Image: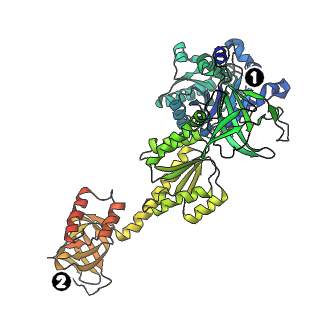
Amino acid sequence: REAANIAARSRDNLRCPIIVIMGHVDTGKTKLLDNIRRTNVQEGEAGGITQQIGATYFEPSTLLNRCKKLNDTEKLDLTLPGILVIDTPGHESFTNLRSRGSNLCDLAILVVDLMHGLEQQTIESLKMLRSKGTPFVVALNKVDRCYNWKACANDPIRSALAEQEEGTVQEFRSRAEEAKVQLAEQGVNSNIYWEMGDDDWQSSDFVPLVPTSAISGEGVQDILLLLCRMAQEKLWRQLMWCGNLQCTVLEVKAIEGLGMTVDVIVVNGTIREGDKVVLCSMDGPVVSEIRGLLTPPPSREMRVKSEYIHHKEIKGALGVKLIGNGLEKVMAGTPIMVVGPDDEEEDIKAEVMSDLTSLTDSLSVDKKGVMVQASTLGALEALLQFLRVETKPPIPVSSVGIGTVYKKDVTKISIMKEKAGFEEYATILAFDVPVDKDARAAAEENGVKIFTADIIYHLFDHFTRYVEEISEKRKQDAAAVAVFPAIVKILPQHIFNQKDPIIVGMEVFDGILKVGTPLCVPALGGLHIGNVVSIEMNGKEQQTARKGASVAVKIVNESNPTITYGRQFDSTNMLYSTLTRQSIDALKANFKDTLEKSDWKLVVKLKKVFNII
Ligand code: GDP
């Protein structure tokens, strides 16, 4: 069998490339996908495009038919058995999926709004594609928004441009040029695809730009044909058909009448009814027998959802629904492997679990940290990479999960509440997953925060803002306890009021004098003078005054209003801010950055004065 597999591997025997669509919100990803998938029943195209599970399959004849006008001049000899386009546009979770170590997606379309240029999410997608080495084309979409654009429905883009007035072409040119510059700023070399030289085409990281309109369809032929060309001319090695199953779980779903099912993309190889397979779950490997391989009915008019087509075997690349026992806990984004007659089941189990194992092992370092829950293993990896490596400072993660957030997850992370100063880690960052109702209630009750988002960056934003809020609140709480270190000298010629309240001129001799600070005279047995209630400098109210400043200070002593300047104390006594162990701890925890080195030195000095150990 192995020999047969090797023999079958050749450039003439390729599998379908798997293609994803990515980009910033509102650039037209969904519209473009709709346009690409358009089934024009009148032209008899419906037959050549079939709905898969989580993907759409295009037959070669359909591709050639769609791209006919363009291919009359391009003359691509299509050798691919079709293409498979993943149905969920823009989803990071899908782009990051892997299948036995290699990317699930062979090619990507990165959609850019020609009118807006590169946006936040475009740049995120760019980074992801480049880190995974996934080749991609950039669709410069909404070309029809150029002033005075004359629609040439579904035409190749060059024919459409030839129909436009000079001003329109000029606008397109300058916008495309702008996009090119912005891409260059991200380190990406690009050019309008028909103006690329041979060297550019050969270069592995040169990116073709294709102007498109997802509304009127100009340039869609170009995108399709270009992707086919890239796939068969550049990616044929990874597309060679082989007998070894490469298969990734997209989603685990309960379906009425079928029970728990697993939607998968069979990337390469064959999966058969009756196969013994191993899948990955949070609780360990799951061994199951395939009891059914299903695809949706061919006609989309079909209303009855449960009427799937049953298959005896499925060859990659294809999207299919699996039925079997024990699939409840299987995780999206993980591989499925068949246990063959010569295989050791234990080896297969270890391999299926390996990605998750290495991920959870890497977590053991963060004892204090947030919980991260993601829709797929790939998404989880991307998120962890972002939080723990790319974020400065990193956000520690203490536990991870895949799929819906349940009450037990809330309970688990709520223990962070008990660790003083780490309340912010009693947080669940839920990336593109639902949150169970009971989990929400439990979170509310236990003061656990759950942030949900389907863009990694947004989760980071939510969390950062939350941490800022917490630290602000902590500062406010601590402000009541924390005492800034200060030594002040009374200026005897500026005594405005001798008691209740005392109002005197002072020079800050050392440290920072702050409103709220309790002042005392250590030389007089720690005599408490009162608390600073206001500070005025040059006629203006201040919250603080630093070393060297001359200020007018109002002091109130609530416990002993009879304290009088000139009686119990006078300008020969230096006044000190009253520090305690507690107040120093509060300072350290919350005002590290506010205080300067010299202030901390003063804290050390005052510790001695007040005998604080
Ligand atoms: P997505 O968020 O990237 O999936 O964007 P959509 O496909 O939902 O499109 C966002 C908006 O842009 C919608 O109002 C679309 O009608 C519009 N749109 C998308 N593509 C084009 C295009 O090529 N030309 C024009 N004029 N509008 C477009």
- Front-most of residues 505 and 532: 532
Between the C-alphas of marks 1 and 2, the distance is 99 Å
Can residue 370 be seen in this snapshot?
A: yes
Q: Which quadrant is home to the N terminus? A: top right
Name the element at disc 2.
loop
- Front-most of residues 559 and 146: 559
Using the image, determine if residue 549 lies above or below residue 285.
below
Q: Position of residue 609 (x, y in %)?
A: 19, 70
**In the image: residue 422, left or right of residue 441:** left
Name the element at disc 1.
loop
As shown in the figure, which amino acid type bears the numbered disc 2?
A: Gly
Q: Position of residue 52 (x, y in %)?
A: 75, 33
- Front-most of residues 556 and 445: 445
Can residue 539 be seen in this snapshot?
A: no
Q: Residues within 10 Å of mark 1 (few under 14, many from 20)?
A: some
Residue ID for mark 2 = 566
Q: Residues within 10 Å of mark 2 (few under 14, many from 20)?
A: few
Classify residue 558 by image quadrant: bottom left
As shown in the figure, which amino acid type bears the numbered disc 1?
A: Glu
Using the image, determine if residue 583 lies above or below residue 302.
below
Q: Quadrant for ligand 1?
A: top right
Using the image, determine if residue 192 lies above or below residue 516.
above
Q: Position of residue 358 (x, y in %)?
A: 51, 40
Residue drawn at point x = 79 percent, y = 35 percent: 296
**In the image: residue 243, left or right of residue 447:** right
- Front-most of residues 378 and 193: 378
Residue ID for mark 1 = 59
- Residue occupying the far left of the picture: 572
Classify residue 538 by image quadrant: bottom left
Between disc 1 and disc 2, the foreground one is: 1
